[in-house]
Image (cartoon, coloured by chain):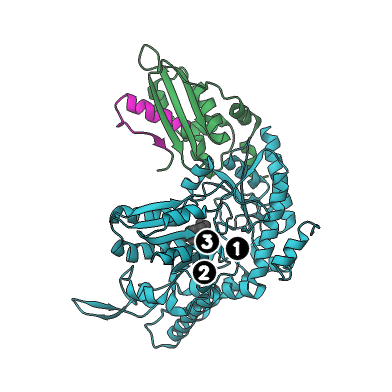
Amino acid sequence: MSMGSDMYRQQILDHYKNPRNYGELDDATFSHVGENPLCGDAIRVDVKLADDGETIEHVSFEGDGCAISQASASMFSGELRGKTLEELDAMDRDDVIDLLGVDISPVRVKCAVLAEKVAQDGAAIYQGEKEDMDMTTTEE
Amino acid sequence: MLTLETLPTVMSTQRAESLDVERVREDFPILDRQVGGDVSNPGAGPDDTTPLVYLDNGATSQTPERVIDAISKYYREYNANVHRGVHHLSQEASIAYEAAHDRLAEFVGAGGREEMVFTKNTTEAMNLIAYSWGLEELGPGDDVVLTEMEHHASLVTWQQIAKRTGAEVKYIAIDDDGRLDMDHARELIGEDTEMVSVVHVSNVLGTVNPIADLADLAHEHDSYIFADGAQAVPNRPVDVEELDVDFYAFSGHKMCGPTGIGCLYGRKSILEEIQPFLYGGDMIRKVTFEESTWNELPWKFEAGTPLIAQGVALAEAADYLEEIGMERIQRHETELADYAMEQLEGFDDIEIYGPPRGEDRSGLVSFNLDSVHAHDLASIMNDYAVAIRAGDHCTQPLHETLGTAASARASFYLYNTREEVDTLVEAIDSARQLFA
Ligand SMILES: Cc1ncc(COP(=O)(O)O)c(C=O)c1O
C-alpha cells in the first residue's frame, strides 16, 4: 500500500496517545513556541540546561495537533537529553525522520520537524544568535 | 436507493431525472487512475495499485475528455493571438474566444459578453473589483460587510483594501448550524455600507446563502453586492439577474474546466464607470505619450494576451454541464452529501459542520473525528486512495468560530457514487480503529 500507511506505526501512535516528557518545566532555562500552519499544530518546548550551561538536562513540551507533530515532539524531547546545544544545532530533518523510523510523506515533513525547529530556535535565541521572535513557524 | 422518508422531498423539490453516473464516469479519463506509488513522478506509474476515489471536488473538479479535447484542438488547429491579427488563425481564435464570453454569460444569466470578464480565478475577480472600485471609492466612514464564512479570497482582499482606504470591515455572524444570522445582517447593512461581499455557497459549511435577500438589503442602502459563486456555479443553476447581484465570480477549475481561468460578472452600467485593474495591451482604445483611453467592455478589464485556450475550453465545460443538466447535478450531489451525512451521523465521535441534512445544502461535508486530527485522517484516507481535504480550507477565521484549527472535507460531484461514499466511511472507521 502507499507510504502513508507506514506513517502510523504502533510506536508513533503510542507516543501520540501517551506523550513522554509532557508538561511544563518550572525551572526551564529557556522556552520557545512554534506552529505549523499546515495542520494547525502548536507546540511549546521547555529546556533546562545543566550547570555547565551547555548540556541539555531535561526537555518537556506541551502542544496540540496531528499525530505526526505530537509523536515527533515526544520522541525528540527524549532524544535531546544529554546532548549539547551545539549538537542540537547540528541536527537536521533527517535526524527527526530517522527517529520516527517511518517514511513521512513530503507534505507532512513540516509536522515532523516542528519540535526540532522550535528547540533549535529557542536555543539560538537563548544564546543570542538569533533575534527574539514571537514564534517559530514551519512556513518559510 | 430512495427510502420512504426521503422520497417525498426528493420528488417535490426536484423533478429532474436522475443522473446516469456510470455513463458520466466514462467521460472522465482520470477516474480510471490508480494511485499510491511515487508522488515525485507525476502521472500514472507501475506502483500505483489502488483505484482512486476522488472526493476533493470542492478544491478542483476533474476534466471531461471533451474539455481536454477542446484545449488540444485549440493548440493543434487554431492557436494564435486574438484581436490583433487579420490572418486566418487569429480570426478563428478571436471569434472562438469572444464567443466563449457569450457562452459563459449565458451560463449564469448575464446580459452578454460586456458583462463577462475572464480572470485567472475567483480570487483575481475579487481583487479586480476591490482594486479598481474599492481602492478608488472607499474611505473612512465606509463599511464593507462580509460574513464569518468568507473564503480568504474575499476576506483577506477586503480586509487589506479597508486598511488602505480607512474603510471598516464588518462580519455577519453565523448561527450554530452555520446559517447566516439575517437579523444581524439587517443590523450591519446600513447607510455606511458601500459593499456587501458574501459567499453564495460556503466551501466548508455547504450553506447556501440567501443572496437575493442580501441583494435587496444592500440595494435598499445604495450598496453594491458581490457574490462569490466558486462553490455554486459548478453544481446548481445560477442566474445573476434573478439573484440581482452587481458582481459575481467563479472559477473554471471547479466546474469541469481548466485551471487558470475564472469569470467575473459585473453589471454593465457599473463596469462602464469603474477604472481598469491592469493596464497594457488589448485593453486600450487610443494611446498617446500622455494619455490613454479604454477599450469597450469586457476587454477593458483583460489586459495583455488573455486566456484563450482556457476560455474556449471553459465554454466547452459549460456546454457539457448544461447538457447533463444543472438541476440533475445539484440533485445528485445533494443526494450523495445526504447519504454521507446519514452515515456519519451514526457515530457519536464525529462532528459535522453546517446546516443539518435535508436543508438546502451543497454537496460537501466537513467534519471532525474526535480522536483523529483532520490531517492524520486525510493521510490515512490516502492509503485507501480516498482523496479528501484537511485543513482550514482557506477559512481560518471561520474555523476559529467553529472552535477547531482544521476540519476534514469530502466534496462530491457529478461522477461520484454511493459506493465511493461507502469507501469513505469504511476508511474513516479504519482510522478510528488505528487511533483507538
Ligand atoms: C468559496 C470559495 N471562494 C473562493 C475560492 C477561490 O477560488 P480560486 O482559488 O479558484 O481563486 C474558493 C476555492 O478554493 C472557494 O471555495
Q: Can you say whether B361 is above or below B28 in the image?
A: above
Query: Mark 3 belongs to which subunit?
Result: B
Would you call the spot at circle 2 few (<14 residues within 10 Å), some (14-19), or many (20 or more)? some
Question: Pointer 1: what residue?
Answer: B62
Question: Is the CB–ligand 1 distance for label 3 below 8 Å?
Answer: yes
Q: Earlier in the sequence, mark 3 or mark 2?
A: 3
Give x and y (percent) for residue B377: 62, 42
Report the amino acid beneath label 1: Gln
Q: Which residues are magenta?
A: A115-137
Instruction: Tell me the subunit letter for badge 2.
Output: B
Q: Secondary structure at mark 2?
A: helix
Amino acid found under the numbered disc labelled 3: His
Can you name the residue that lies furthest to the right here?
B4
Residue most extreme to the left: B290
CB at disc 2 and ligand 1 closer than 8 Å:
no
Looking at the image, tell me whether mark 3 or mark 1 is earlier in sequence order.
1
Residue B93 or B374: which is nearer the viewer? B374
**Residue under circle 3?**
B200
Q: Are marks 3 and 1 on the same chain?
A: yes
The span from disc 3 to disc 2 (Cα, nearest Å) is 10 Å
Label 2 sits on what residue type? Leu
Residue B139 placement (x, y as % from top left): 28, 58
Chain A colour? green
Q: In the rendered image, which quarter is residue B125 located in? A: bottom left
Q: Residue at x 53, y 40 (%)?
A: B403
The N terminus of chain A sits in image quarter: top right
Q: Nearer the viewer, mark 1 or mark 2?
A: 2
Element marked by disc 3: loop
Q: Is B410 situated above or below B101? A: above
